[in-house]
Image (cartoon, grey):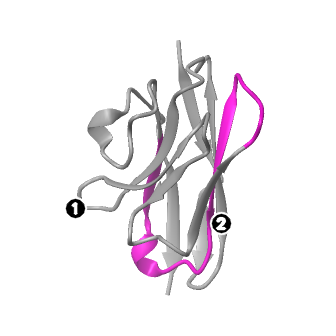
Amino acid sequence: EVHIVESGGGLVQAGGSLRLSCAASEFTFDVGAIGWFRQAPGKEREGIATITLSTLSTVYADSVKGRFTISRDNAWNPVTVYLQMNSLKPEDTAVYYCAADKWGFAQLSAADFHYWGQGTQVTVSA
C-alpha cells in the first residue's frame, strides 16, 4: 500500500524559506508523478507544483512560479520529492499536501492524483 508522508512545515517570517519533503513509500510507478497542493482556510485546494518522476519535467502554478522549486532525489521506495519555498508571503500560509499520480499524466488537478498524504502546516507571518 502506498504511504505518503510530508514533513518540513513550520512557522517562518515573510521573505523567508522552507523546504518541504514528501516521502512516498511502496510507490512503484516509475512513470508516475508527484505533486504538491495547498489549502488555506476557506479556500479550495490548489495545485502548485508537480514533477514527473521519469522525465523530471515540472509544472508550476503562477502563484508560486519563480519562488518555489520542486525536485526529487534518485532513490526509489521511498521516492522523496522536495518543495523548496523561497520569498514566502503571508498568503502562502496553508496546509501543504503531497500527492502521487500512478501514470505521469497529472499536472495541477487534484482529480488526477491517486494517493495523498495527511499534510503539513506552513504559516508565514507578516
Above or below for 47 versus 102: below
Which residue is under mark 1? 42
Magenta-tinted stretch: 73-98
Residue 85 in the magenta stretch? The answer is yes
Query: Mark 1 packing: few (<14 Cα in 10 Å), some, or many (20+)?
Result: few
Mark 1, secondary structure of its residue: loop
Q: Position of residue 15 (x, y in %)?
A: 60, 85
Left or right relative to 69: residue 42:
left
Nearer to us of marks 2 and 1 is 2
Above or below for 31 versus 120: above
- Identify the residue shown where x is 59% and y is 81%: 87
- Identify the residue shown where x is 55% and y is 20%: 29
Q: Amino acid at mark 1?
A: Gly
Left or right relative to 73: residue 53:
left
Nearer to me, 42 or 82: 82
Nearer to me, 46 or 66: 66
Q: How many marks?
A: 2
Q: Position of residue 102 (x, y in %)?
A: 46, 24
Nearer to me, 23 or 111: 111
Q: Position of residue 123 (x, y in %)?
A: 50, 68
| Image quadrant assignment for residue 3 | top right
- Identify the residue shown where x is 68% and y is 38%: 80
Mark 2, secondary structure of its residue: strand
Q: Which mark identifies residue 18?
A: 2
- Identify the residue shown where x is 59% and y is 69%: 11
**Marks 2/1: CA–CA distance:** 23 Å
> Do the CB atoms of the residues marked 2 and 1 lie less than 8 Å apart?
no
Left or right relative to 18: residue 109:
left
| Image quadrant assignment for residue 76 | top right
Q: Amino acid at mark 2?
A: Leu
Q: Position of residue 70 (x, y in %)?
A: 60, 55
